[in-house]
Amino acid sequence: MLLRQFIKNSSNPPLTPPKEGKLPPFGRVGVGQTSNFKTMKKELNIIGKSHQKLDGKERVSGKAVYGHDIELPNMLHGSILRAKYPCAEIISIDTSKALTLEGVECIITANDVDVNNIGYKRDHPILKKGTVNCNRDEIAAVAAQTKEIADKAIQLIEVKYKIKEGVYDPFEALKETAPRINEFGKGAEQFGNKNVAEYFHYEHGNLAEQKAKSKVIVKKRYELPRVTHACMATSNITAEFNNFDGRLTLWSSTQVPFLYQRDIAHALKMEPSKIRVIQPIIGGGFGSKLDMHPFEPICVLLAKKSGKPVQILYSREEEFLASPTRQPMVIDLTTGCDENGKFTFREVEIIKDNGAYTSWGATTPFVMMQSYSSLYQVPACKFDSHAVYTNNPFAGSFRGYGNPQATFSIESNIDLMAEELGMDKREIRLINANYKGEITGQGLHFKTCGAIPALKTVIEKSNYDKIMAAPNTGRYKRGVGLGSMLHVGGGAKIYRSDGCGTTLKLDDYGYLTIVTGSNEIGQGSETVLAMIAMEELGIPKEKIKVINTDTDVKPWDVGVHASRTSFVAGNSLLGAIKLIKEKLNNKASQLLNVKTNEWEYKDGSMLFNGQEIKLDKVAREMHFASPHELCTVNYFYEPPSRFQDKDFKGDVSGNYAFASQAIEVEVDTVTGNVQVLNVHVSQDVGRVLNPIGLQGQMEGGLATGIGYALTEEMIYEKGILKNPSFHGYKMLTSTDMPDVHFYPIETYDEAGPYGSKGAGEAPLIPTAAAIANAVSNALGVRFYSLPITAEKVLRALSEKKLETRNSKQETNKI
Amino acid sequence: MNFEVISPKTTPELLNAIYDNQTENFRIGAGFTDLINQFKTQETEGLILINLTQLKDDNFKLIIENKTNFQIGALTTASEIIDNKSIKENFPVLYQAASKLASTQIRNVATVGGNICNVSPSGDMTAALIALKATCHIIDCDGNERKELLSSFIRGLKKTSLTKKEIIKNITIPKNAGQNLKSGFEKVGSRKSMEISIVSLAYHLQLTNDGIITHAGVACGAVAPTIPFTTSACEFLIEKNINTISENDKEEFAIKVLEYANPISDIRASDWYRKEVLFNVSKTIFGK
């Protein structure tokens, strides 16, 4: 009843209630369709209808060429020797025995190479000397004629260590008495503690005033585990160095080819343009390939030294051991609300286990502070985050980039505040939800906003009331939980440019080549680009080629991150299409002797007023007839977002994505297992471009999110990974997937292509939060750390039983 | 991995291969789902692999109904067990154990004999067969045959009574006395597939028409170095009526099962969890 009252009395801008659309494969919800963006008005034939991925057939039939499939003439195979101990002094390295093994071509150690440290803090030596600081540390590398020989040679390298006591807890590392872990870290000078690798501070509003206003204040500590991407294709690289012209070709599965080119160049003291990065088909990215890792420059060093191409492929065990992880952290979150449930403030202190070196994990506050400052309406916010060196492995970026962690803590605290206030958990979210036109304390401007429609949709669709009202006795207990999220939807201006270039070529036969700066890592963006070209130019799919794998050919782009690719590359392509249409329009008008710019593009032809000319004919006439020009154009798109100021304030993205999930779980009180029964997810995607691709992003993201919530954890004991296999690392399988009910919200944001917003990361961001809230709802016990394993559940239940028994005994005494 | 492979096609060839290599280091492989993993971490140089995938002998392969028992060839795969109607009807515990094993791909190649000889405390089909009081039929390369109850065939962690000369030919399960059964396999793990049991409970209770328990077989997996047949818990159930069994009796049964548990703590679960779950699950087998 409270909820209904709210909807009636809401002071937020009125919004059309969610409606079921007709388009398969799922209902859609449209909001605010009054935008004047011209491409939104016209009827679309391609966009919004499902299209198979361009490389779908190759992938499912095994024809796709991954990095592992590449074979070059005379190619050698590389293998890396890693530290035996996570914290030790290296006394000596003896490679003599390994060198005598037949088939070994060369061995490198830190003493053989002239290189720079890597990582954005430049605190990470490619090959370690003097000391090793974590169990993935690279000490030596071998190139040999076969992988087996290389692996054997690695075992023949003799390293003498002096074992040291490591520091595996960031709170221990912060102590005065702790040893300095990374000798290149500048913590003492920059942050007042030798083991602090990175620090972020953010604030807005008047914290003291808001605290005073608060009726309820909840302070809790949340602990987030270390999890890994577990890409199906293990890390791989093939390097070929040309001794004659000093040029390097890399077949690499990086997500960010142009940044990578620069990073490789810096690491190896080369000129970036001498490095050509070619991307074979990538078997999973999810953020893991956003940074360059030591094995990549090591592969180049082996290729240079041996004079032959070298390939390094990780085994599955090595993939677990040596690829980046999601950033683990401890979050102390204090939040408040007034007597009406309106949020007053958020104060958060985060300690991150940075590991031994600094990669992108340390920069997750960029995203986290957005959620703390701006997910729901937050009058005041204070945010502090320390990334602390330890002898654990370092964390990188991972789909969501800190946001799943932040959202888990925020949404848990919201439930707790509602409970303390005696307020409906739906209502407290709805009265605080973000709204269209809001400019948040951090300066994010929500020109469109599907937050409230998304929340209302999942509440309605999930049978929330029914689940809450059902009797909850017996072995299996059911519960439902809510979680919402905010994420960038129009790129993120982290670098000086967040843009993307496109070159278009229409050939003499009417085939269109799209050369895009963006790249495909399986997310489906190249398919969306082809769809845009089909839509705008009326060229069939078979006549469209997307070229996106070669830095020597394609124009600049930041890379795949921040859910940005379809947004920036789509806008860039639309810009290029506008230019090529101008050319074509002029030529067609000239050829048919009409004066118009209103040509319609359909089925490979241009039409106007009953006249028709084939596209290929126009292109040929441009090419072969005077004044002889090519039908090509270049366009560069830069999003309207702004670089944030030194206080991290500013409208950092072209638009913002919102989503809510209502998740129903069933807890088996006999085993402690939590089963996710139904996921209702509603997401403001601006506009649906490729429904089947979007559904895939939803399901894939949810699989990762559910694993994060319930089962996945890299188990470390004193810096050593105890479960480097799928046997021990419990990534869920298809049989564990619940039914996914997806309701996209279309807000038609002007900034995005056809009104769309980035959608890739969002599906997993609120999942753990909603599951944790659902488990708490089912059991009456709350979990403050992930994953919520069966053992944690059973322990909590047995403690609860004990508590109840004890309190009963006490009552009896009285 | 670098080893010699012998692929016998007949039983005499197989026995010859075993005989000829008595002084060598050899391993026998059927489904290879465990062996390949072991080879990844073991030195395989000089190893001889006797590969059973090409062996053609019905005694090793078929599921046969005899007068007093069912005979299951050692090379029967988990999928073949699942597909067999008699197994499903007579021994739901084995059907369920095979169904819950790993994934379809693994079930298509993993064999009963392999599951037994891998001697894992969490072997699902092995636990079911122990609850069913199965017997191993063993032959050796000198032409001898012998039988041994599966629960005594397994001698300890990774240990069986099998000598280097011997191989399991098939397994027999005594026929049920009647039609009324309460039989099933509870597998506890964090995934629905590709999971190795954290705890398992295999139970096979035979009942009169009125629900009186006449025969009981209960074994628990992954809670001790070997899979125990819980004799005292089984004896406790005899003559109890499954329809009216009291909560106290359920608890007492669970306590008796728990007496056989001596679990370890590892990355998958603590000893506390394993005991707690075994206790909890044991109480639930009587319900519908």
Image (cartoon, helix red, strand yellow):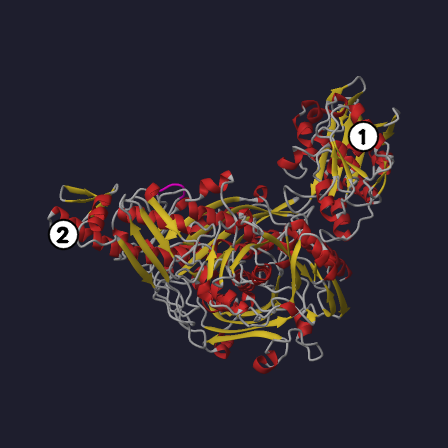
Question: In this picture, is A194 found above or below B193?
Answer: below
Q: Secondary structure at mark 2?
A: loop
Marks 1 and 2 belong to one chain: no
Quadrant the C terminus of chain A occupies: bottom right
Q: Is residue A724 visible?
A: no
Residue A24 lies within the magenta run: yes
Residue A741 lies within the magenta run: no
Q: Quadrant of residue A1?
A: bottom left
Q: Chain of mark 2?
A: A
State the residue position of label 1. Answer: B17
Inspect the image, locate mark 2, and give the three-letter code of the amino acid beneath it: Thr
User: Which residue is drawn at the image coordinates 67% and 33% (left, top)?
Assistant: B109
Picture coordinates of residue A345, whole percent (x, y): 49, 72
Q: Is residue A264 left or right of residue A675?
A: left
Q: Chain of mark 1?
A: B
Picture coordinates of residue A796, whole percent (x, y): 69, 56
Tally of numbered discs: 2
State the residue position of label 2. Answer: A596
Q: Which residues are magenta?
A: A22-26
Inspect the image, locate mark 1, and give the three-letter code of the amino acid beneath it: Ala
Q: Is residue B160 left or right of residue A186?
A: right
Toward the viewer: B249 or A676? A676
Q: Mainly helix, strand or loop, the magenta region?
A: loop
Q: Secondary structure at mark 1?
A: helix
Q: Is residue A343 left or right of residue B190?
A: left
Picture coordinates of residue B112, whole percent (x, y): 74, 32
